[in-house]
Image (spheres, rainbow, N blue to C red):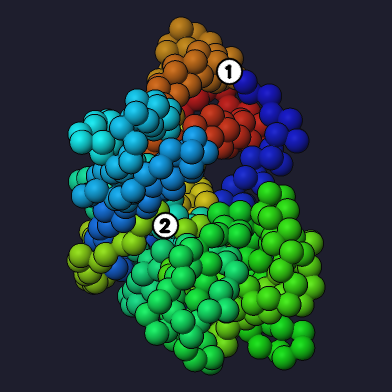
Amino acid sequence: MVYFSKAKMIAVLLVCLLGIAFSAPNFFKEETLNSLPDWLPHKHVNLGLDLQGGSHLLVEVEFSVVIIEQLETVVDDVRTALRKARIKYTGLGVDGKTGVKVTIRNADKIEEARSLLRALGTLMDISESNNTIRLVLTEKAITERRSSAIAQSISIIGRRIDPTGTRELSIQRQGDERILIQLPGVKNPERIKRLLGKTAKMSFHLTDNRLDEAIRGRIPPGSKLLSRVASDNQRGPVLIKKRVMVSGEDLIDSQPSTDGTSGEPVVSFRFNSRGAKKFGRATADNVNRPFAIVLDGEVISDPVIREPILGGSGQISGSFSFQEATELALLLRAGALPAPLTILEERSVGPGLGADSIAAGKIASIIGMVLVVAFMAIAYGKFGFMADIALVINMLLILGGLSALQATLTLPGIAGIVLTIGMAVDANVLIFERIREEVRLGRGPVSAIDAGYSRALTTIIDANVTTLIAAALLFIFGSGPIKGFAVTLGIGILTSMFTAIMMTRLLVVLWLRRTNPKKLPL
């Protein structure tokens, strides 16, 4: 354990230098960092909502919309099944908030119809009265759909607000249909509210040329009348076919760009293989016909198909500003929400409490550091001084690790750092006490140091690994502040093991080689 190769020395020094380099930006202002070369580390530690303030939004998922959409799908399935079986019916439609009903004209066909409808799914209760069959969603189906909608909403909200995944947002389920969103550092949440205010369900439809008839109130079967988005320069409603030619669910990418001819902002999109085939077939069969692009029930563009589009990609133009094109591309890329979101509560959290917490954390850290440094120096002399140097390096490594990973530092995270200060010297205390025991048994300096490190190593690893497992479980199953504590604790354990086993030992070995003492100052 006393032998230290040059390669190992260089590796230890390199880790220390990297930790110092990544922690250094936290001691400079943003303006100073902006003037440095891009290849140098320049990221500050990410502060959580409790330390730097930000925005707090409570939204509700309009789950009734999800149920209605599911029931409308059931209506379509029922219509298709009965038509294929040549069973005549009437009065097919949504019944109440959780059911579908249909009346069979021929009483002799009731049992056959029941069998067909029962085959549509196991999550609906079927009943029959006076030739009318009712299909009602079961409680299990509603519960599963609600859980799925909330989970999907949380995932899509995260992709919309934080597409790169570098900001530590807090998005948590609250009750059955509500979601709590906390945005550290966001002082004006208007853009976030715009991103959350759109469901972003996009579909492509053929237009119906019987617009005049629809405007007079006679909407043709299989068509519907939609308005245009406010930003579209064209005027008047658009009559579209209800049938969806291509769904936005098949989009795999969308990016803002500019039209090569007009120079106007547009949104370029690309389909997956299934969507590309549908899009290619739809455009090939309908050349010289308008093709409406519908987003959240409004027509954003209805260009004429000039030629088949077979490559699975295209662009959406609609008199966008570049910001609107960028936001639309982000919405389409993140995916459609299963249901609209309603903002129930909005609060801005000021950084005042955070400033006080940071100041208190600094004071606690400094006091803890001073007391630990003094104790080690008094209890172990030169060896304690070496442990104190390693402790300072340990703090810089923790700071550098938080900066490099852009992990969010919360108030409990500061508590984790203060705790780490005390834990950081535990390994050194074990090692030094082992060395003292070996000295009392009559071993020489080199032999005592070698035996002390060898015998203490297993205990150190066991103790820190079990704590690291606890930190990992806190991170996996915890949320918000608990995760903040787990992050700093986990990083602190790793850096403490490194500084105790490698850094302090390197200092001891260098001192041993330089002085070649006859007696250890312990």
- The quadrant of the picture occupied by the C terminus is top left
Residue 488 in percent (x, y) is at 39, 44
Q: Is residue 303 visible?
A: yes
Number of numbered discs visible in the structure rendering? 2
Q: Which mark is residue 337?
A: 2
How far apart are labels 1 and 2 at the CA level?
Answer: 62 Å
Residue drawn at (31%, 62%) of the image: 341
Q: Is residue 219 above or below residue 127?
A: below
390 lies left or right of 276: left
Residue drawn at (68%, 79%) of the image: 304
Query: Which quadrant of the view contains residue 78?
Result: top left
The local crowd at label 1, few if under 14, some if 14 to 19, many if 20 or more residues have their Cα within 10 Å, is some
135 lies left or right of 12: left
Disc 2 secondary structure class: loop
N-terminal of the two: label 1 or label 2? Answer: 2
Residue 77 in percent (x, y) is at 45, 42
Q: Residue beneath label 1, please?
A: 450
Residue 362 in percent (x, y) is at 30, 58
Q: Is residue 173 above or below residue 241?
A: above
Pick the residue in front: 452 or 518. Answer: 452
- Outermost residue, top direction? 441
The local crowd at label 2, few if under 14, some if 14 to 19, many if 20 or more residues have their Cα within 10 Å, is many
Residue drawn at (33%, 41%) of the image: 105
Instruction: Name the mark nearer the viewer: 1 or 2.
Output: 2
Q: Amino acid at mark 1?
A: Asp
Q: Amino acid at mark 2?
A: Leu
Query: Which quadrant of the view contains residue 219?
Result: bottom left
